[in-house]
Amino acid sequence: MERPTDADPAYTAPAILTVTALNQQVARMLERSFPLVWIGGEISNFTRASSGHWYFTLKDDAAQVRAVMFRSRAQYAGFIPREGDKVEVRALVTLYGARGDYQINVETIRRAGVGQLYEAFLRLKEKLSAQGLFDADRKRPLPLFPRTIGIVTSPQAAALRDVLTALRRRAPHVRVILYPAPVQGQFAADKIAEAIMTASRRAEADVLLVCRGGGSIEDLWSFNEECVARAIDACAIPVVSGVGHETDVTIADFAADVRAATPTAAAELAATPRADWLASLSSDAMDLRRAMRRTLSEANQGLDNTSRRLLSPSAQIRHQRVKLLSMAAALTHAVRTPANRQNLALAQLQQRLARHRPDMRTLRARLAADGRHLNAILCSQVKQRRDALNALAAQLELLNPQRTLERGYAIVSNAKGEVLRDPAQIKARNKLTVRLAGGSAQIGVSSVQNPPDAAVE
């Protein structure tokens, strides 16, 4: 297959990169390929520009690399490196496009060995936090009017001078008690914890400042010890921690009730300026005077109004007598009016009752006459009924079978109780019952004779 030539219309010439574009692409490739990493080495050729940027070379026994740390990052370093210092930097690998030099952009710098201290710091912080020493509900508010302030620091420390200067300027009336303790070096942490416990046991101060000036993490390490944190937590009075500069953070800061950025800031937090208090008191006094004047004015007006309404005893008695008479008349009217109304209603009801009440005398006479007439009628009817009854009784007596039997007649019945009226109903050897006037008898029939009319036939 033939290679296309420049004259071939399908041939496309390769893109031409400028040096700037090339360096930019290489820089982006390096930044993507290498994330932020920690690099250890020795400082060489250190330069601090007027802009605040740091330029230096980081080297070891076999190689070196250029480094830059811009002012926005360098101001939080906490120290200024010197030639030959062993350091550890957290940096981004990149390329300086203007010269095509490979370099590192430093984000964070610390002294060599600080990494182990920082890990120990993190482990202790996690441990104490898990135990609740840093909980917000354990923090105590600072007293509003401290009369005595305790300070735990070294008598030779510059932080003590800063604190005393701030207190003298802001609150010269406040009493200061120093609990001396070394703030760095061997056994300094034990001495600091002992001073804190002494202040807590004596209870002489209203608030306690634990402070020290700035320094490296090694210089501030005494305030990262567990014994200091536990002493602050066990302290009976509120504790303000003012250790290092604004960017320095220690375990004591987390354990304290309030953390201040600097020792001077700790003094400012502990004591409100006397001028502010005096101004506040003056304002309160002015408000109180205004309130008192307003209260007195209102009381005077109220007194005047009361005095105008106030009457002499005799006038009050007359007024009350008139009022009493008026009330008595109203009471009498209130009592009589319903009584009169009820009496009138009663009279009307009595008139109505009189109109509708019957004449009892006439009615009693009529009732007596009706009673006599009814009695006469009843007596006549009873006599008539009795006579009719006697007549019926006489007729009944005539029809009484017993009377017939008494005249010599008898009633003959067969064994079935049937009354026999015809001799034909009687047969020989029948048992018959004969009922007479005095009783009945059982008879037997020996023979039956036909009646005379029957024989003739």
Image: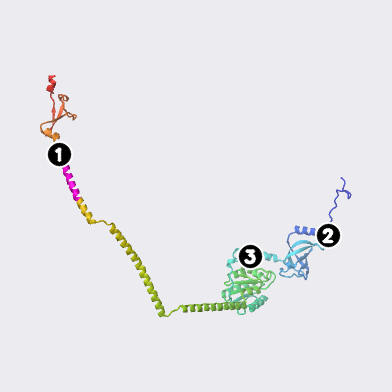
Quadrant (top left, top right, bottom left, bottom right) of the N terminus: top right
> Could you tell me the amino acid type at mark 2?
Val
Determine which of the numbered discs, if any, sits on residue 125 in the image. 3
Residue under the point 33% across and 66% down: 340
Q: Position of residue 217 (x, y in %)?
A: 69, 69
Q: Which residue is mark 1?
A: 391
Say which of marks 2 and 3 sits in front.
Answer: 2
- Cα gap from disc 1 to disc 3, whole angstroms: 143 Å
> Could you tell me the amino acid type at mark 1?
Ala
Furthest residue in direction right, as rendered = 7
Q: Residues within 10 Å of mark 3 (few under 14, many from 20)?
A: many
Q: Secondary structure at mark 1?
A: helix
Q: Which residue is mark 2?
A: 19
Residue under the point 16% across and 40% down: 388
The magenta stretch is 371-389
Please indicate whether residue 47 sits to the left or right of residue 378 in the image: right
- Cα gap from disc 2 to disc 1, whole angstroms: 172 Å
The answer to whether any part of residue 152 appears in the image is: yes
Please indicate whether residue 398 sits to the left or right of residue 246 in the image: left
Query: Residue 442 colored magenta?
Result: no
Say which of marks 1 and 3 sits in front.
Answer: 1
* Pointer 2 or 3: first along the chain: 2
